[in-house]
Amino acid sequence: MFTLLILILILDSLVLATVVLLQAGKGGGLAAMGGGASTESFFGGRQATTILTKLSWWCGGIFLFISLVLSAMSARTGIPRSVLDGQIQTPTPIQLPLPANPSTGVLRDSTGN
């Protein structure tokens, strides 16, 4: 289910990007707000809604909805785990060599010192 929703999200994002790029620019926007913009373009005016505008709204809404669903699904996966949990191994104890004569307790070199 999770993989299917991710696939739908990717397809929706490709359609959304294509639809947004196909739309004609309106000419106003942020650049026209500073000076010379009429009040009709500033407040939006009444514009004809095209199929590309409707499609971009629908694709954007679907994208947000599926993203929200995927976010909720991934939050329910369980307790947080570390990536290192499966890699940590218990250390093996190191065996030190015992001296040949345990009563002396002192190791001597070849010269006898």
Image (cartoon, helix red, strand yellow):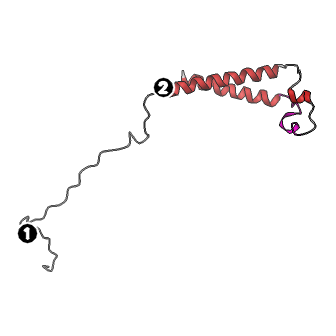
- Residue wearing tag 2: 76
Residue 17 at x, y = what percent?
Answer: 74, 30
Residue 104: assigned label: 1
Answer whether residue 63 is magenta in the image.
Answer: no
Q: Residue 69: which quarter of the image? A: top right
- Mark 2 nearby-residue class (10 Å; few <14, some 14–19, many ≥20): few
Answer whether residue 31 is magenta in the image.
Answer: yes
The front one of 39 and 103 is 39
Residue drawn at x 20%, y 55% as measured from the top left: 95
The front one of 5 and 33 is 33
Residue 51 at x, y = what percent?
Answer: 82, 19
Residue drawn at x 69%, y 22% as measured from the top left: 61
The front one of 40 and 48 is 40
Tell me if 76 is positioned left or right of 59 in this view: left
Residue 5 at x, y = what percent?
Answer: 59, 23
Residue drawn at x 57%, y 25% as measured from the top left: 70
SS at mark 2 in the image: loop
Stretch of the chain drawn in magenta: 23-34
| Mark 2: amino acid | Arg
Residue drawn at x 29%, y 45% as measured from the top left: 90
* Among numbered discs 1 and 2, the one appearing first in the sequence: 2
Residue 43 at x, y = what percent?
Answer: 86, 27
Q: Say which of marks 1 and 2 sits in front.
A: 2
Whether residue 107 is situated above or below residue 52 in the rendered picture: below
Q: Residue 22: which quarter of the image? A: top right
Looking at the rendering, in which quadrant would you find the C terminus? Answer: bottom left
| Mark 1: amino acid | Thr
What secondary structure do most residues of the magenta stretch adopt?
loop
The Cα–Cα distance between marks 1 and 2, rounded to whole angstroms, is 64 Å
Whether residue 35 is situated above or below residue 60 in the rendered picture: below
SS at mark 1 in the image: loop
Looking at the rendering, in which quadrant would you find the N terminus? Answer: top right
